[in-house]
Amino acid sequence: MNKFELDKVMECFGFEKSDNYKINGYNYYHNGKYFTIVDGKTPYELALLIRKKYNNNIYKIRVNGDHESKFPNNDVYTYHIDTIEGLAAFIFESQKYYKFQKSYEDLDQVLNLIYFKILNEVNPNVNVYDWMLERENRNDYFKTLLSSKTSLDFKLRKKIESFDNAVNPFANNSLDVNYSTFMTRGDSYCHNNWFSLIDKESGIILSTIRKSDGFVIKLHIPLQKPFEINVYHYFDKNGEVIAFERYNESGLTKIEYNLTNSTFGEHYGEKRIATLEDKKYIIQNLDKYISLINDIIKRNIVITSNNSYTKKLIQK
């Protein structure tokens, strides 16, 4: 959890932005790394209730900052909370326990509002090409992306756009953040922002990272730990790249295609000029992952009468 996410949680509970939130006998503040510190006496009864009810990886409410999965054996005076869900759950249960005035009937109600506020703040409707056209040192490259290309290059470019719009389904302007049930993470600062959409069922993460001079579009697929698959579309000092990354018992395998200089090969190996077969390989793999993402979108975006994109997914 970052400070931006902490502030959004507090905003949804009706508290004004602060570096140190002093609420109902507790001090809430960000440690500058990845968690929020909660100082203040939590009675053993409440601490035990929270531990039993939210004994789940997505909450990460740590008694006295302990990473071990232990039940409290007395009153608790310090919590380290790593997640939006954990902090919202702690405040929600504390308000119920002390019978403070509360405005939410259940935890999901406030979590959905927090996710909505994060998405609105990071403006997910901007696609990566519009973002890059606003970067003075990068817009010339992106203005020429669809010019002077073969039919296969054009097909590849459209497939990459489809991948980007799948990972960030709001960028196609056909979906509304009001109807998202994704767990959401994010941050917004200066000329940079990022957000991730997390599928509760599979743990698959769709991430969009916008930087002052580039971007990263990423699909993360967790497999049996510690294995995983990552698919990237990014632009950095080395140019524009599509990459397929796999961690397994053999280690890391990463295949890269650099669109800027048209090279293809292993990340740590020798690169060659991309062939027609290499480009077809990229298209086929992107097709597979786009299909997977579309299935995830179908279970996380609520269909409305005006939601033509989701209707198309369902029909497909």
Image (cartoon, helix red, strand yellow):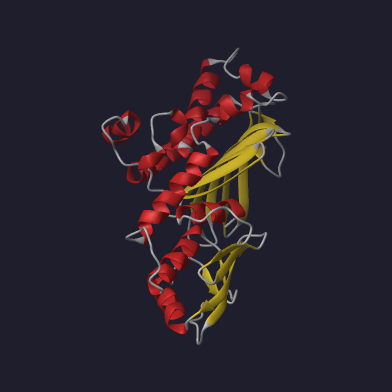
252 to the left or right of 182 = right
Visible residue check, residue 283: yes
Q: Where is residue 62 in the image (x, y as percent from the top left)?
A: 54, 72
Q: Is residue 25 left or right of residue 175?
A: right
Q: Quadrant of residue 107?
A: bottom left
Q: Give the x, y percent position of residue 300.
A: 36, 45
Q: How many labels does the image show?
A: 0
Q: Position of residue 137 (x, y in %)?
A: 73, 25
Is 205 in front, or is 270?
205
Quadrant including the N terminus: bottom right
Residue at 45 percent of width and 51 percent of height: 114
* Residue 82 lies in quadrant: bottom right
Q: In this view, does 99 lie above or below 220?
A: below
Q: Which of 134 and 169 is in front in this view?
A: 134
Instruction: Give the residue displayed 38% in from the left and 62% down from the top.
Output: 102
The residue at the far bottom in this view is: 73
**Residue 91 place in picture, x, y as percent:** 46, 65
What is the quadrant of the C terminus in the image? Answer: top left
Check the image and report above or below for 196 versus 234: below
Q: Which residue lies furthest to the top in this view?
A: 148
- For image coordinates 46% across by 78% down, the residue present is 47
Residue 256 showing in the rendered view = no
Between residue 99 and residue 160, name the one nearer to us. 99
